[in-house]
Structure formats: C-alpha cells, structure tokens
Amino acid sequence: MWYIFSNLAFNQTRINHQIKSAELRVIGPEGENFGVLSLPVALERAREAGLDLIEISAKSNPPVAKIADYGKFQYDENKKLKSAKSKAHTVEVKGLQVKIGTGEHDLELKAKKASAWIKEGHRVKIDLFLPGRAKYLQKNFLEERLERILKLVTEDYKIALAPTKSPKGMTVLIERA
C-alpha cells in the first residue's frame, strides 16, 4: 500500500494554498506590515509580487505570514540551522582510571590530561579502580587516594558528583568551576 505525503509531513512550513487560516497578519517582501488580511487577499498580493505566501508563525493569533521567495526562505532557514548547530557545544564526559598504587608521575600525567579536558569545558569522571578485595577497604582511605589526583589538577574545577561507590570501585565527577 502506497501513502502520499505532502511536504507538510516533513516540513512544518506551509506555503500558498496549504495555509488553512482564514485571516493572517501579513508582512511584505521589504518587511512592511500589511496588517491583518484575509487569505484570498494575501494570496493575491503575493501573486502580484510574483512571490510566495509563507506561513512563519502558525501558533500566534492571527498567524503571521510573509510574502517572499520560498526557495530563498528555505535557504536562509537552513543556513540559520547550520550556524546554530556549529555554535552548539556538547559537553562530553571524559574518563580517567587510576589504581590505588598508581605512581606520582603517572598521576601527574593523568591530572594534566584532566586539566586539558576541563579547560575545553568537558566533565571528567575519575574512576579509582579497585581489584578484588580492595573494594572492601575503608571509605576514607579510598577518598584520600582520589584526593591525590584531584590535588594535581591545575584548572579550577568543582565536584559535580561526590565520591561514590561504583562497580569498578570509586568514582568522582568534576567539571569547570
């Protein structure tokens, strides 16, 4: 069975005869305000200008429509969307794993990496890996081991999630202050 989809199913922008509202607040091609017009009058104005009637804001009362070239309108909308996407910065959670007996030099290297990630704006999850029976050591001893690496982080940070037990051992989450 075949289904026919209008472009409205994929794109919420209605143009010309797809517009359902009886009255519209119309904006001209140069940005001038034509006021509230009936749909047939607005379509006639758009036809006279050789352009399309594009519904911009369907949810307002009355809906807002603009007389413009639909191809150019779509191009501008896609350009705005791409620009907004490129400016959006996603925050990742980066992970580090240390053991109870990790040496000072290795801790310094890992802290340096954590500092770089925090500087970039990412969150850093530091796992204190506890093999076997080490999982049952006293909590204050394990927190002291986590503090060893936290003292070496050079960037300003705040603890987003306090040290907690995890399946691997103990975990702390830090982020930019």
Image (cartoon, rainbow, N blue to C red):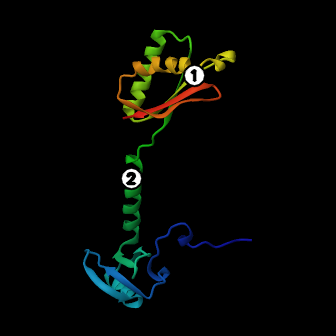
Q: Residue at x 54, y 17 (%)?
A: 141
Q: Residue at x 40, y 81 (%)?
A: 61
Asked if 38 appears above or below 73 in the picture, the reply is below
The answer to which quarter of the image holds residue 114 is top left
The residue lying toward the viewer, choosing from 5 and 176, is 176
Q: x, y percentage for residue 175?
A: 42, 34
The answer to which quarter of the image holds residue 59 is bottom left
Q: Quadrant of the N terminus?
A: bottom right
- What's under tag 2, amino acid-wise? Ala
**CA–CA distance in space, label 2 to label 1:** 45 Å
Q: Which residue does the numbered mark 2 point to in the structure image?
A: 84
The residue lying toward the viewer, choosing from 35 and 8, is 35
Label 2 neighbour load within 10 Å: few <14, some 14-19, many 20+: few
Asked if 167 appears above or below 21 in the picture, the reply is above
Q: x, y percentage for residue 17?
A: 47, 83
Q: Which residue does the numbered mark 1 point to in the structure image?
A: 139
The residue lying toward the viewer, choosing from 69 and 22, is 22
Label 1 neighbour load within 10 Å: few <14, some 14-19, many 20+: some
- Residue 76 horizontal side relative to residue 125, left or right: left
